[in-house]
Image (cartoon, grey):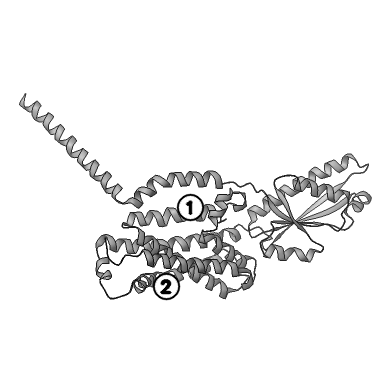
C-alpha cells in the first residue's frame, strides 16, 4: 500500500514538473515577440503569396504591332490577338526600327511584324509571313507568349480558309531578342545573384549583432565613446568585403562556368552590385536593431527575405499576372530592381542610361534603411 501511494506521489510530482517545464517553454517563446509573430504570421503570408502569386500563365502582355499592309487578313489576326486576355495593344509603329528600343525600355512583351502586301501574297501565292519578336532574356515568358500568338494565328488561318478557294498557309517566324538559343541560365543567373547576395549579406550582419546581444558583449560596445553610426558601420565593413568576394565568385561561375555573357558595362554592373550589397547589409543592421535573439534574426533574414525575392521579384513568376496589391508590394522588394538592372546590363547589353531608375531606387532604399536602422538602434540594452 505504501509503495502504491509513493508511486502515485511520484507520478503526480512528475506531472507537475513536466507542466512547469512546458509553461516555462511557452513563456520563453512568447517573451520574444518577433519569434512569436513570425511563427504565427508566416503561414498566413506564405499561403497568400503562394496562392495568389504562383501563376505561370501570362496575361495582359503589352504588344507592339507593325502592319504595313493593313488589310482584311492582318486586321482579322490582330482582332483575334487582342480579343482575349493574353495581349493588350501598347502601340502601333510605322517602321521595324522603332521596335527594339521599346524592348530595351522594358515597355512591351512581344512585337508582331507583318510582311508587306500580306493578304495579296496570301491570295496569289498561298503563303504569307508574320514574325513574333519577344524578349529572350526571360525565355519562359517569351516562349509562352509566342506559343499563344502562334495558336491564334493558326485559328485565324482556319477562318480564312473557309472563305478562300485556294489553300492558304500563314508562316509564323519567332525571333527571340538577346537570347536566341533560349538558354534558361540567362534568366536564372540574375535572379539567383539577387537572392544570394541579399540573403548572405542580411543574414551575416543581423545574426552577428544578435549573437552579441545574447552573449552580453554588446553592452561593452555600447558604453564605448564610438558613435552609433560608426559602430554599425564597423560591424558592416567586414561583411561588405566578404560579400564582394561572394560577388566575384558568382560572376566567375556565371561567365566561365555557365556561359552567361556580360554584354553591357562591367563597371556599372559592379557599381550596381556595390549599392545592392550595401542595401542588403543595411537591412541586416535594421533587423538586428529590432530583434534580441539569433533565432528571430535568422527567421526574419532568412524566410522573410527569401520568400518575397522568389515570389515578388519576377525571378521565377511573371509579376504582371499577380493581383494589384502583390504588384505594389513587389515594388519595395530590393531584389526586383537589382534583377531587372542586371538583366539589362548582362543579357541585353544596355548602357547606364537604361538603369538610372533602378540605381536611383536602390540608392534611396539604402539611405532610408540605414537612417531607420540608426534611429531604432538602442544606445543601451533594455
358 or 307, which is in the foreground? 358
- Answer whether labels 1 and 2 touch (C-beta < 8 Å): no
User: Looking at the picture, how far across and down is residue 13, in whole percent?
Assistant: 14, 35
Mark closer to the observer (1, 2): 1
Q: Which residue lies furthest to the left in this view?
A: 2
Q: Residue at x 64, y 60 (%)?
A: 137
Residue 333 as seen in the image, left or right of residue 183: left
Q: Element type at marker 2?
A: helix
Residue 351 shows in this picture: no
Residue 312 shows in this picture: yes
Neighbour tally class for label 2: few under 14, some 14-19, many 20 plus, Cα within 10 Å: few
Residue 210 as seen in the image, left or right of residue 362: left
Q: Residue at x 36, y 57 (%)?
A: 297
Q: Of the numbered discs in the image, which one, if any, rests on residue 240?
A: none
264 or 259, which is in the foreground? 264
Task: Please say if 183 is above or below 26.
Answer: below
167 or 327, which is in the foreground? 327
For disc 2, the marked residue is 241
Task: Please say if 17 is above or below 368.
Answer: above
Could you give the CA–CA distance between mark 1 and mark 2, rounded to whole angstroms?
26 Å
Q: Which residue is drawn at 89% across and 44% down?
A: 167
For disc 1, the marked residue is 307
User: Looking at the picture, how far across and down is residue 66, in whole percent?
Assistant: 80, 58
Quarter occupied by residue 229:
bottom left
Q: Element type at marker 1?
A: helix
Neighbour tally class for label 1: few under 14, some 14-19, many 20 plus, Cα within 10 Å: some
Amino acid at each position: 500500500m505504501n509503495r502504491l501511494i509513493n508511486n502515485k506521489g511520484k507520478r503526480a510530482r512528475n506531472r507537475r514538473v513536466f507542466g512547469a517545464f512546458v509553461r516555462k517553454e511557452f513563456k520563453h517563446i512568447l517573451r520574444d515577440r518577433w519569434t512569436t509573430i513570425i511563427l504565427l504570421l508566416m503561414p498566413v503570408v506564405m499561403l497568400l503569396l503562394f496562392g495568389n502569386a504562383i501563376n505561370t500563365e501570362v496575361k495582359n502582355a503589352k504588344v507592339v504591332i507593325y502592319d504595313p499592309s493593313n488589310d482584311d487578313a492582318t486586321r482579322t489576326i490582330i482582332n483575334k490577338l487582342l480579343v482575349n486576355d493574353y495581349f493588350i495593344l501598347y502601340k502601333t509603329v510605322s517602321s521595324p526600327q522603332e521596335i527594339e528600343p521599346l524592348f530595351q525600355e522594358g515597355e512591351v512583351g512581344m512585337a508582331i511584324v507583318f510582311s508587306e502586301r500580306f493578304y495579296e501574297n496570301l491570295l496569289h501565292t498561298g503563303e504569307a509571313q508574320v514574325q513574333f519578336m519577344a524578349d529572350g532574356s526571360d525565355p519562359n515568358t517569351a516562349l509562352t507568349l509566342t506559343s499563344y500568338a502562334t495558336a491564334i494565328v493558326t485559328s485565324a488561318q482556319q477562318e480564312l480558309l473557309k472563305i478562300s478557294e485556294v489553300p492558304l498557309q500563314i508562316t509564323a517566324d519567332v525571333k527571340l531578342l538577346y537570347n536566341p538559343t533560349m538558354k534558361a541560365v540567362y534568366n536564372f543567373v540574375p535572379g539567383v545573384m539577387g537572392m544570394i547576395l541579399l540573403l548572405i549579406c542580411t543574414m551575416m550582419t543581423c545574426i552577428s549583432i544578435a549573437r552579441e546581444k545574447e552573449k552580453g558583449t554588446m553592452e561593452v560596445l555600447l558604453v564605448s565613446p564610438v558613435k552609433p553610426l560608426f559602430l554599425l558601420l564597423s560591424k558592416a565593413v567586414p561583411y561588405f568585403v566578404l560579400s564582394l568576394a561572394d560577388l566575384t565568385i558568382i560572376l566567375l561561375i556565371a561567365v566561365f562556368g555557365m556561359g552567361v555573357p556580360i554584354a553591357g558595362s562591367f563597371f556599372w554592373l559592379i557599381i550596381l552590385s556595390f549599392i545592392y550589397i550595401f542595401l542588403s547589409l543595411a537591412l541586416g543592421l535594421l533587423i538586428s536593431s529590432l530583434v534580441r535573439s539569433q533565432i528571430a534574426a535568422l527567421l526574419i533574414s532568412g524566410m522573410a527575405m527569401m520568400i518575397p525575392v522568389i515570389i515578388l521579384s519576377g525571378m521565377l513568376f511573371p509579376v504582371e499576372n499577380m493581383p494589384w496589391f502583390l504588384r505594389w508590394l513587389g515594388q519595395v522588394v530590393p531584389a526586383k530592381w537589382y534583377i531587372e538592372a542586371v538583366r539589362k546590363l548582362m543579357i541585353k547589353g544596355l548602357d547606364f542610361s537604361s538603369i538610372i531608375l533602378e540605381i536611383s531606387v536602390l540608392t534611396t532604399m539604402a539611405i532610408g534603411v540605414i537612417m531607420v536602422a540608426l534611429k531604432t538602434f538602442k544606445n543601451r540594452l533594455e
